[in-house]
Amino acid sequence: MENKEKRRIDKGSLIYIGITFAIGVAIFLVTFFTQGISVKSSLDGSFVAFAVLLLVGLLSLVASFGFFDFASYSFYYVFATFKKEKKYNDLNDYKQEKDEKRKKTKKNYLYYFISSTPFLIATIILRIVWQTLL
């Protein structure tokens, strides 16, 4: 039974990686076809896809450390003023509950890093090809 649960987690991770990779491919295709079909446009497209996925992964990593808790608590507090009952008394309560939730959740930023790796490899290869063509 425990083995089946591990398979589900692996399947879910593969699906998430596939979705982020598909987003990278979509970014690549948009950049590739808007600049015209050439080696330089494929180089630009693969680099833009790599950069976007890497930056989203880095933002997810920073958010997983609780860097944006103050801002999200501020939004919560603004909307909680309209309600009679508040879930959190102060920022410390909010941060403690978020820290507990973070311990239980997956490391989603790893999916972005894994999905960006093929675009980095493609960027390096295309850069070498482009340099030899010049």
Image (cartoon, rainbow, N blue to C red):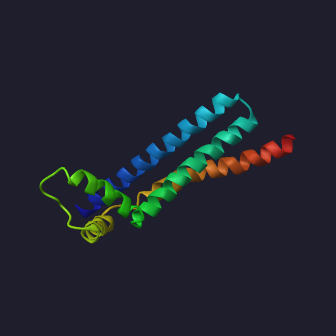
Q: Quadrant of residue 91?
A: bottom left
Expressed as whole percent of the image width and height from the top left, the position of residue 134 reads 87, 41
Furthest residue in direction left, as rendered: 84
The residue at 62%/44% (across/down) is 48
Describe residue 19's horizontal placement relative to residue 88 as left or right.
right
Q: Left or right of 39: which side holds 99?
A: left
- Residue lying at 58% horizontally and 53% vertically, measured from the top left: 117
**Residue 36 located left or right of residue 95:** right
Q: How many marks?
A: 0
Q: Position of residue 70 (x, y in %)?
A: 36, 63
The answer to which of 11 and 98 lies nearer the viewer is 98
Rendered image quadrant of residue 96 = bottom left
Residue 4 vs residue 100, the one in the foreground: 100
Where is residue 7? Give x, y as percent: 33, 56
Q: Residue at x 24, y 51 (%)?
A: 79
Quadrant (top left, top right, bottom left, bottom right) of the N terminus:
bottom left
Q: Is residue 60 above or below residue 37?
A: below
Q: Position of residue 42 (x, y in %)?
A: 69, 37
* Residue found at the very far right of the displayed protein: 134
107 relative to 34 in the view: left or right = left
119 w.r.t. 39: above or below: below
